[in-house]
Structures are given as C-alpha cells and as structure tokens.
Amino acid sequence: MTSLTNLGVKAIADGVAGGEFTAVEVAEAFNANVAAAAALNAFIVTTPEHAIAAAERVDADRAAGKALGLMAGVPIGMKDLFATKGVQTTAASHILEGFVPQYESTVSQKLWDAGAGMLGKLNLDQFAMGSSNETSYFGDVANPWRRNDGGNAKLAPGGSSGGSSAAVAARLAPAATGTDTGGSIRQPAAFTGISGIKPTYGRCSRWGIVAFASSLDQAGPMARSVEDCAIMLEAMAGFDPKDSTSLDMPVPNWSTALNGDLRGKKVGIPREYRMDGTDADILKSWEDGIAWLKDAGAEVVDISLPHTKYALPAYYIVAPAEASSNLARYDGVRYGLRDLPEGAGLQDMYAATRAAGFGDEVKRRILIGTYVLSAGFYDAYYTQAMKVRTLIQRDFDAAFAQVDVILAPTTPTAAFGLGENVDDPLAMYLNDVFAVPASLAGLPAMSVPAGLNSQGLPLGLQLIGNRFDEQGVLNAGLAIESRAGFTAQPEKWW
Amino acid sequence: MSNYRIQGATGEWEIVVGLEVHAQVTSHAKLFSSASTAFGAEPNSQVSLIDAAMPGMLPVPNRECIRQAVRTGMAIEAQINKWSRFDRKNYFYADLPQGYQISQLYHPIVGKGALTIEADEKAGIPVDKVIGVERIHVEQDAGKLMHDQHPTMSYVDLNRTGVALMEIVSDPDMTSPAEAGAYIRKLRAILRYVGSCDGNMEEGSMRADVNVSVRKVGDPNLGTRTETKNVNSVRFVMQAIEHEAQRQVDVLEDGGKIVQETRLFDPGTGTTRSMRSKEDAHDYRYFPDPDLLPLELDDAFLEECRASLPELPDAKRARYTGELGLTDYNARELTAEVETFARFETLLAATAQAIGKSEAKVATQVANWSLSVAPGVMKALGDEADPAHATAQAQAAILTMQDAGEISGGQAKEIYEIVLKTGRAPDEIADTEGLKQQSDTGAIEAVIDDVLAANPDKVEEYRGGKDKLFGFFVGQTMKAMQGKGNPAVVNQILKAKLG
C-alpha cells in the first residue's frame, strides 16, 4: 500500500474514479502513515474515522454511478486554524484547547463537498503567528528533511503552516490546507520541498478560519505538484456571502487550463529582492529559475519594486494591529480556557485567562498591535504602515503593467534548525521578507520546489501574479516544476 | 437663545447642552447577523455565532439597517455620505463578546443635518429654534449584564448584542432643559414617522448621553463638559441637565473646577454621580474594521430611500395649518405622534367622504372632535368603553349627523358614549334613543309662537332695546323642546319673529 501514499491529488482522484483502487484503501494507507509519524508531531488530533467515512461515501457514490467531486477520494490534512464541526479546533493555542466548533468553515466544507476526507487537524504556529511552528502550544513540528551532514539536527518545517508542510512532504497526506498571512503557505512549502499557493485576497472565504490578521489572511492548498494545487484551490475557492471581503467572481478551471508554455509572457525579476546576505544557494536557484522560464519561452525583464524594504516593517505593524483586536474575543467568558482565580473579578479573569492561554509570540504581537493602535501612536505607526501598504500595491501595479508574473526566491535561507531563531524574533521575522510584499498587496503567489542546496535541503522559488491571475502564477509554476525535475524525497527517519 | 439662567452668588450662568441619542434601528435582524431583535425574549435565545464572537465568525452588514440610517439622515435633511466605513472600538467587557464594538468614528454614514424645535412660550422657548445634528452613525449595541441572579456571579444576556443602533449626535445648540426635552421629542417623532426606530424609551430603544457645560452669561468660551450616560426618558434628560448644571455652578462658585468625566444619572434621586474621569478613560484604539469593506451607496439605493420617506412632522404641520386651516395648537397636537395623525387622517377622510365636502371644509370639526370631544368621552367612560368600537366609520357617522344639524354637540357625545359601550350604529342610536334635534321649522315656529305669547312683557322689553333677553327666549324655546331644537334654526326663527 505504500505506493498509494506516493500519489498526489490528481493521481488519487483519477485512480478512484477509474476503479484502480478504492477511496477507502487510500484513506487507510494515509491513516497508517499518519499513525506511524508521531515523531513529526504534524497533527494535533488525528481523525482517521473522518477520512474513512468520507472515502466510503465516495466509493458508494462511484458504485452508484454518481458524479464525483474534484477531490473525491482524496484524504487531506486540515490546518487546525479551520473550524471543523465536532472536531477540536485550537489554532495551536492553549486558550482554545478543547474547543469543539458547532460549525464548519466554508473552505473545509467545500473540500468535503468535493469528496475530500480529513486525516486530522494539523499543527501550526499558535494563531498562525510564527515561521517555524515553534510557537504551537502542542509542540514543535519536525521537518521531515534533514541536513546531509549526518548531524540529524531537527529542522523547522516553516510556519505557520508547519504541520501542513511536514505532513505533505512526509507523505502523511497528499495535500493539506494552509493559510497565508505573511508567507505562512509559501515559506513552509519552500522549507519542505512542496508547492503551495496563496490565492488573491478574497478568493477563499475566511468564514470559519480563526482570524489572525483579517486584511491579509488567505487560505490555500499545499501539495506536491502545481497541478494538485490548482485542483485543490478550485475546490476551496469561491464567493461566500458570509464573508464581506469575499470576491464575487466565478472560480476559473485553473487545473484544466494549466499550460507551462510561456511564449509571449514576460517575467519580472525585482532587483530589490537581491538583498545583502541572501544565501548563495538561494541566489543560484533564482538564476536557475530565470533560465527555466526563459526556456519555457518567457521574456525576462528586470523590474523595480522600490518600496520592498518597507514591506516587512509595515507588515509587522498592520498584522499585529489587527491581531490585537481579533484576539480580544478570547477572554474566558464564553468558550475556551477560563482561569478564574479565587475571589477574582472580571478584569482579573481576563488577565489570568489570557496570561495562561496565549504563548509568548502571541502576547508579543498583541502588545505590538495594542501599542501601534494606541492614542498618540496611531498615526506614526498604523496610518504610516497603511500608506506604505498602498505604495507597495502601486509598485506591483506598475510592475504588472510591464510583466505578467514576477519570479523571486520564496525565502532568504533554507530550513533552519529548531531552536536556532527562537530567541531572536527579528531574525525569525526576516524569513518572510520575500513573502510579505505580495501579502500586503493581496496578490496571488506560490512557492514551487527548485532544487536542493549544498546541505541537501529543498529550496523554493516564488511566483507572484497580478490580482485574480492565479492562472499566470500556476502556469509559471508548472514551467519551473517541469524543468526543475525535483523528485527528491526526505529519507524516512520518523 | 432661551432665557434659562442659573443664579449664582457671583452672577448669572447659562448652560450649553449637546445630546448623543442612541436609537435602536427598527429591523428584524441585527446589524451584522441574522439573529432576531425582538424585545423580551428568553436570555441568550437570540444569539448567532457572530454575536457570540465564535472563532472565525465574520460580520455581514444588514442592508435594512443601513437603509433606515440613510432614511433617518434624509429626514433631517442631512448630508448622506455615499462612502462610509466601519471602525472597531476596542475595549474589554463581559457584554462585548468580540472585545470591540463595530462603529463608525472616522467616516459616518450621515453628516450634518438639523431639526427644528417649535416655539413654546410656557416652556421658555419663545421662537422656533434650529438644532444642528453633527452626524449619525450606525453601530452595534452591547449585551446586558445581570448582577442580581447569583450571589457571587454576574450573568450575561447576549440577545441585545449586535443589534443596530443609530447614534445621533447633536451640536451643542441647546441652552435649557426644555430645549433638550423638545429636541428629543422632535427627534423621536421624526424617527417614528420615518419608521427607523420605535422610539420606545422604556424598552431602551432610545437613550441619550447628555453633555452639559455651564458658563457665565456672555462668556464666548465653552466650559468643561460632563457626559451623563444612558438617560432613558425625556423627563430624566431634563432632570439630569437641571441637576448637572446646578452642580457645576455650585462647584465653580465654590472655586472648584469641572472635571471632564462620564457620569451616571440616578432616576430615583434625580441626581448624577461620577462614573469615571478622563484620566481613567479607555483608549479605544479605533481602526478600520478589516473584516468589512467600505460602505458605498449607489444612486438607486439613495433614490429608493428618499422615495420611501413619508410626509414628515414639519411638512405635515404646515399642511394642517395651511391647507386644512387648523389652528397652530391643533396642528401641533395632531402631528406630535404617529398614532394621533394616523387616526386623524383616517377619520378626516371618512368624514369628508360621508358628508360629501372637501377635507379642508370638515378639518376643524374633525380636529376638535379628535383632540377634545372623543378623548373626553373615552376618558370619562374609563373601563366601560371598548376602544375597538371607536371606529372611523362610527365617528364619521356621528360627525355627519352633527354637520347636517340632525344632532347637537351634546347629543353627539351621548351617542358616542353608547357607541363605545355597545358598538351599536350611531344612526340607529340617534333614532332609537331620541337623540336627534328638531330642525323642522314649522314645529319650531309653533313652539316659539307659544313662548312669545306666554311672555308678552319680555317681548315688549326686548323690542324696547333689551337685547340681552334674546337668550331668555332661546332658553325657553329649548326647554319647551326638551333641548332637541336645532339651535341655529331656533335662533333664526326667533330673530325673525322678534324683528
């Protein structure tokens, strides 16, 4: 059965539809891999029964000759930021430990409606705040990849969708949901040698996703091929009247329109992304990417995104500001953790509950966010950051007047060791320096594997498209994928 | 400028008042959720996942609430902002599940407008006065804490959480408690005419935050103001202003300073007390709500809002005095409440039709009946009256008989009494109960001839110039007719005969 777990979304859906194997066989195979991978700590809870039940429905539908959905028979991992009805949803926090929603997020519901099943709820950085999955209340996730130096140091799987990236890379799931606020799909995808796309802001409904920063949060798929990402994104996307920021546009058939022929297309190479101190292997992979896209017929154009250096500081004002407000609801009054010391009043209860319920990184961002919104500082920080955000959007608008898609590295380094950056938040935040600009501009962006670095670790290349042009991003991603020939897999050690 | 003054030892003080009125928007669902807004339901039975701020829940604006705010703005001829935005007002409290209230600080939906309070000599408002409205914005209401349910715990009822409110902010244009009272009454009337708020202050559908400051008469600068929160009746608003202004004058006269603070009104004592000072004031960290797009209103929507507005109090009053020829007093009384003018207009139409005259011709008769006669009968009967019998049809029938001279004013009252008690038809009552007046000139002439014949001396005196005796003859005639003579006919014939 091990061969089934090497299959991706498309291969599984085709195999189930064609009767090569049953959906239940697939679910069982992945359930077994999940059960055997506790050492990775990719899941907070596993739900093998959910995967089997969904698979049984698909098998029954197929037997009855009913039409099968896009994701029929595909068991997936669900980032534990999505509310799942009847299944604990924690955002990897203590404050929501034991919280079982009575509702299903729009995106997860769409996936179940498309025939997918759930293997379990995936670990992540607490409230999606982090770039290494080390801020989870439920422990670090280990990257299935290890350096080729024989040291066996545990590496970070990236974050915040670290459980998602680890599970997909380790063949615990053919695909997983992620969410991306400032790189949380793309950076972990790059760290684990898989693909992941953050669509245009508004493509996927945010209803039922635990909010981090509302104006930036976007759900997206993480999988082992560009085509798998396209299929799964089709299943996830779509207008939702329950989300006021949802895009009221039809969902294109990205997967059927996939085309890696880039003749007539222009690819922009932003000079500001060539930063001092960027890893030589990263720069090398970028050059490879340029060569591959040229080979696919694209014209490569040098472009400028002049406000790039202000993106990270602006992001670390806007995102914490929104988070400080979004997380105010976790107060111990209605659900989740309540810490009510003897004789305590309401304010004491708030303080005790939130002190016990939030981790350090979450507290840090709440403090930053509260500070930048407070009277006397609002204009200097929040207003200024929003102006920067507009300038960054204009940079991209100007660029996309010239080019069809932008190519850049996903991250400044390959996966780092667990514990290496935990005491240095700024170093940790720098991980997202290439990812954040597209987030602030609400643009579709994806990471695809480009190759291995000198330490044997995967590197990702990032493609950024104009708003609504997921197709352009996926097509360029496919062009790279088919030339990079990335077939490496982490050696199983867990 | 009103002449309301507070006499202090150091001189005369005048007061400056501004009101922030919170009016609950009339709508079936809440501002950002589909939960019901009905009053009086079991605690926590009208709470959606959004209202309870469950993880991942998102607000979606309720079109009807926005429409009502726009219509209200149009009713006070305010600027309607086609582009507005929701902001979050952040603070922690157990009645605020999100940890923030969605409101509109920076870009409210309605800008500057105004309403006019009418002159009322008795209340010290010598002439009509325009009170400016700075803005109207929409926002979420909070839930309700109940502290009396358990010895050591407080309970939270989230039914009210997320219900749409309009905050209507006046300019500091009022200078007496009476003006403030008149402003709230006028605003309430407009809201009720428009149908955007039921104006029910007892149920909390309308509450006011009262801003008061005092200054020496003639001082161009405003004094430091206090804000008294959540005052929930017109009388309490006036009391709170009176008390708060006097308190401020006392403090200042004693050499003290007014602290900018939030105060609470105690309806039991009619006094205010400090709740929190500016130093303890929250930093609400307002910022644009990232879950919501800016609100953009298109012309079709605005057109629909405008077209749906009813005739408003000022226009109606002008029409009543102008077209219908009613007195200022009657027009004001009849237009004060939606129910009053609605009843009046129904009866007016029915009466005009029944009599076959224009509304203007019968308006005064119907107005007097509606404002004094009918309520007087109803009141006198007390529980004996069944209001269900007070139909426009029945009343129009009575007024028609009266107009035709078939019944007198007194008979009209008597008939209406029976109508209210029994629901019988007025014509039938008039016939059966003998409640009709005699207009037959022949019959009246005969009675008058008898009266004149019986009183030759009085006839002599009258003809000799003692005009006052005319009343005597009328009285004798009516007496002889058991009060059923048509006074106009009696007068006319007497005049002719006495020559």
Image: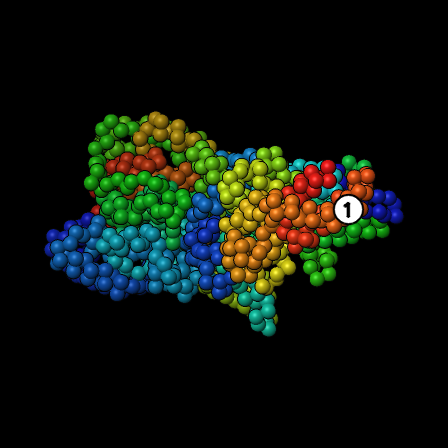
Quadrant where the C terminus of chain B sits is top right
> Mark 1, chain letter?
B
Residue sitting nearer the eye, B314 or B420 = B420
Q: Position of residue A234 (x, y in %)?
A: 26, 45
Q: Residue at x 57, y 37 (%)?
A: B360
Q: Position of residue B221 (x, y in %)?
A: 76, 38
Q: Residue furthest bottom?
A: B151
- Vertically, is B151 above or below B15? below
Residue labelled with disc 1: B456
Q: Residues within 10 Å of mark 1 (few under 14, many from 20)?
A: few
Q: Residue furthest left?
A: A19
**Residue type at tag 1:** Pro
On the question of residue B369 being in view, the answer is no
Q: Position of residue B377 (x, y in %)?
A: 62, 56
Residue sitting nearer the eye, B347 or B135 = B347
Quadrant where the N terminus of chain B sits is top right
Q: Residue at x 61, y 43 (%)?
A: B441
Q: Quadrant of residue B118?
A: top right
Q: Residue at x 26, y 40 (%)?
A: A252
- Vertically, is A344 above or below B450? below
Q: Secondary structure at mark 1?
A: helix
Total tally of numbered discs in the picture:
1
* A109 with respect to B202 (left or right): left
Residue sitting nearer the eye, A226 or B462 = B462
- Vertically, is B132 above or below A366? above
Q: Residue at x 20, y 60 (%)?
A: A57
